[in-house]
Image: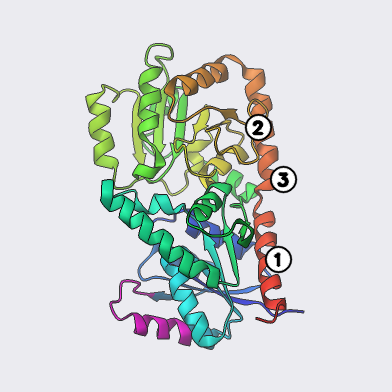
Amino acid sequence: MIRIKVTHIINSMGEQLAGGETYLITLIEHSPGVTHSVVCKKGSGLAGALRGRGIETMEVDFSLSDRRRLIRCVEDYCRGQKTTLIHAHGFFSSWLALRAGSRTGLPVVVTVHNRLEDAVHKRRGLRAAFELWARRRMARRLWPRAEAVTAVSQGVRDSMCRAGIAANAITVVYNGVDVDQVNQAAVGQLPKGLSSIFESPIIGTVARLEPFKGLENVLAVAAATRHSEPDLKFVVVGDGSERQGLMRTIKKQGLADRVKLLGYIDQPALVVRHFLAYFMSSPHEGINRAALEAAALGVPLILSPNRPEAFIDGVSAFIAAASKPEEVAAKIATIRRSPELVMSVSQGGSAVVDKTFSAQAMATAVLNVYRRVLSSGV
């Protein structure tokens, strides 16, 4: 029996739990035979969530200018935890894990949660191109040094391949959803003040308000359906740097009565279960966790054709290019006027989540990676 004691390193986003943080929590909850400890950002919401679950956690300041001190801190923590493997989540975390791993002799597994292109979404023009080039160059130097590299979607894997990482060196381990937990989280009243909005049919999405999420596509579809679906409303659950810009665009286009930015909601399932359909507005991302949770709740998905993963148009999702509002509008018209098809597609989407994107399937796949690395005698 291989003893598995994993120290995870994750430079978490802040007070709110994003996809990487939720992935980690789900992994820990569904791998009871593994001992987990976590190094995360000081003062982050993830630290509190982990301690609330009884997970050994060390908070560090990832912005320390003294990188040697940071590496020693992680190195000492791994030795104290009697760690047998380091699992890094994200770009900077992989650098830190590989440095600590080289000093302790511990093998490193890297999980990449986002496309490299998404990391430069706040840049423009030549600056964005240079930063993307630099990140790809660093990725080519870093990730091949790990004993195993995983990606959370085909879209992330493709991005890594564009950076020069060999396709056969990447294992895709999809985000996993605990269907029972999602359905339990959906039980309850709508958050205060939202009841009047949800008296109308809703097309919604859950996303950080950042450029790479393609939220301008939500506004474009809202405008395109203004006359054909006048009673329809569009909601976005989440917060981020683009909030003020989106608010200005909504006002400028006269969409204030149709598009609502609801901000961060701790239990989005309470809202998502009321959606007529979930619209994944990013045309480039692999299918994200929020969309999978919507499918688990029986909400039909509208996905872009370049990244449906295991979903099939008219069987388990509705496929339309997110950047083409007329295509999305046509799918919305179908959804509103074909209740039997919607029921069939919703059931198909839920079945795909159960088969391909379950929390247990994700945890089992990661555990297989751990065992392969540790049994190799690295």
* Alpha-carbon span between mark 1 and mark 2: 28 Å
Say if 240 sits above or below 297 in the image.
below
Height in image: 364 above or below 216? Answer: below
User: In the rendered image, which residue does mark 2 sit on?
Assistant: 312
Q: Residue at x 22, y 33 (%)?
A: 248
Can see residue 83? Answer: yes
Magenta region? 60-76
Q: Amino acid at mark 3?
A: Lys
Q: Amino acid at mark 1?
A: Asn
Place of residue 277 in the rendered image (x, y in percent of width and height, measured from the top left): 52, 29
Dot in front, 2 or 3? 2
Name the residue tied to disc 1.
368
In the rendered image, the quadrant that contains the N terminus is bottom right
In this rendered view, identify the residue nearer to me: 114 or 136. 136
| Quadrant position of the C terminus in the picture | bottom right
Q: State the CA–CA distance, disc 2 to disc 3.
A: 14 Å
Q: List the residue tagged with mark 3.
A: 355
Spot occupied by residue 225 in the image (x, y as percentages of width and height)? 41, 17
